[in-house]
Amino acid sequence: MAWSCTVWCVARRDRRKIGFTRISARKNFGSISVIHQSTFFLYFWLSFLGGVFIGSLTKLRQPWWLAFLVAGLALFCVFWRRNYKLMFVGICLIGLGFGWWRLASSQEIDLNKHLSRLNNGPKTIITGFVASEPEISKDSKQFILQAQSPLAGKILVTTEKYQKLNYGDKMQLTGKLKAPENFSNFDWISYLARDQIYTTMYQPEISLNLHQGGGVLVGGYRQILNLKSKIKNALRQSLPQPQSGLLVALLLGDEEYLSTSLKDKLNLTSTRHIIAISGSNIVLLSQIFFTIFLYLGFWRGQIFYLNSATLGVFILMIGAPGSAVRAAVMAWFLMLAQKVGRLSSIDRAMVFGACLIVLIKPMALRFDVGFQLSFVAVLGLVYIKPWLDQLFKVGPAKIYWRELLTMTLAAQIATLPLAIYYFGQLSAVGVIANLLVVPITPFLLAGILILLPIGFVWLGLAKILAVPLWLGASYILMMVDFFSRSWWPVWHLTKISWLWLVVCYIILIGVLRWQRYRHAESVSTAMSC
């Protein structure tokens, strides 16, 4: 006859902790298992992410997610408080099915009412408004049109580079609607689907209306973009080129005023991310600002609010693009963990932050490179940086510079495999160039934030006060020019398999676990002595 004994252990000092601990001893299992309620939630949300990822890889139209949900619910209900291992499996299956369902539901469209039903047909007249900030490339301009008639939907429109238009402009387009097509081993269709875009239009005839559409929210965002334009003009008037162009790109991610040769040099030195609104860059900047505030004497509670405000202002100033907002969410969860002083629970906080983003925008998990970089960069700061701190031990006087060094290096190590996988390029001096360039960027950003209000009021004074910014920008340009010389090798890697990426992170995780084991062993030896 099977018997079971359940002991509830609640220690006085642990009453503030969320969850409970149950020790279940069962004769038929012959083992003792300790299950935390928080562990159930952690693996449920990890399974949710797994379900979203699996769903993004498959093209199955059948509701397979329903099978996982039913099986998970059956296991959970049948073995409730009888077999915690099978309950645990049930929780994971429910999370997997829920994630797959969330992805499938985000891709469901009513073809009878959606604009995509007109794809690959004759010329069509479309009325709508500009729903994204126009992006300028070498010889064209792209923007998203939110169509209102004859049917609703989003269109990725490509037009002439010098076509004048702004966010919120209401217009009428005449042209052929086309379904997007995959190219060069890239799933372009799924990439656009992450933003619910299933239709494209190339070089249409455009008729702009004088009034603007989109409602109150569109009007508010249009004001943010107008502020962004004023900031751009103020910087260009305060500093000469190429320094002003670099600072505009550094602050706003706008590469319009950078020469082609400078962009190539940034690519060769693996430093182009400093002028891109990348996820890893935003996370790293938030942590560098955290170190600066800490060095200035603020305590952690004050730093959390100061850093949150700085990050919020920065995101608004650059136009609040979706990738930057998602990266800021990841950075904010790390800042929150630093505020409460529980970095040991950062893995749960990061999983929750990632799930919050993916729950709102499921396709971001696989097709948003910025989100992936920000997530990996945060994990690098949490797990790799402490190891680097042990390697680079310095005196109290130099600890600030060590923090900048180890933060930059930890983020670089964590994101390097992803960067190689997506961009196919590895520089022999990329890490060195980043170590010399990245720690300067928060000082330049802080200087810009101080200079801008002065520039709006008194341009002459702003030009005088901009001299330190000119020196900092000139330093970055000098470093980029030096490390982009032909004697530094650069490897161009193409057709990198995702298996290579998996192996790289398995090796990295193995090294970190081995290092942690060595550290624990040395501590145990020291205590025994």
Image: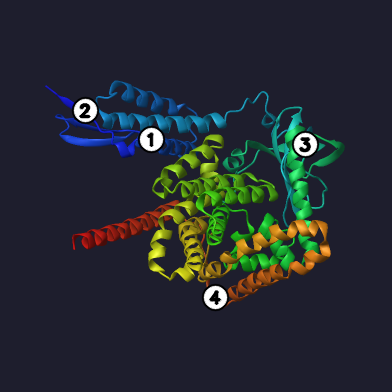
- Pick out the residue farthest to the right: 210
Residue closest to the far bottom: 487
Secondary structure at numbered mark 4: loop
Inter-mark Cα distance, 2 to 3: 63 Å
Mark nearer the viewer, 1 or 4:
1
Residue type, label 4: Trp
Q: Position of residue 404 (x, y in %)?
A: 51, 64
Of the image marks 1 and 2, the number of the one nearer the N terminus: 2
Label 1 and label 4: CA atoms lie apart by 53 Å
Which residue, given by chain and number where applicable, does mark 3 sit on?
Answer: 129
As drawn, 516 above or below 122: below
Q: To which quarter of the image does residue 26 belong?
A: top left
The 10 Å Cα crowd at callout 2, few under 14, some 14 to 19, many 20 or more, is: few
Residue drawn 41% across the image and 64% down it? 389
Which residue does the numbered mark 2 point to in the structure image? 6
Q: CA distance from mark 1 to mark 3?
A: 48 Å
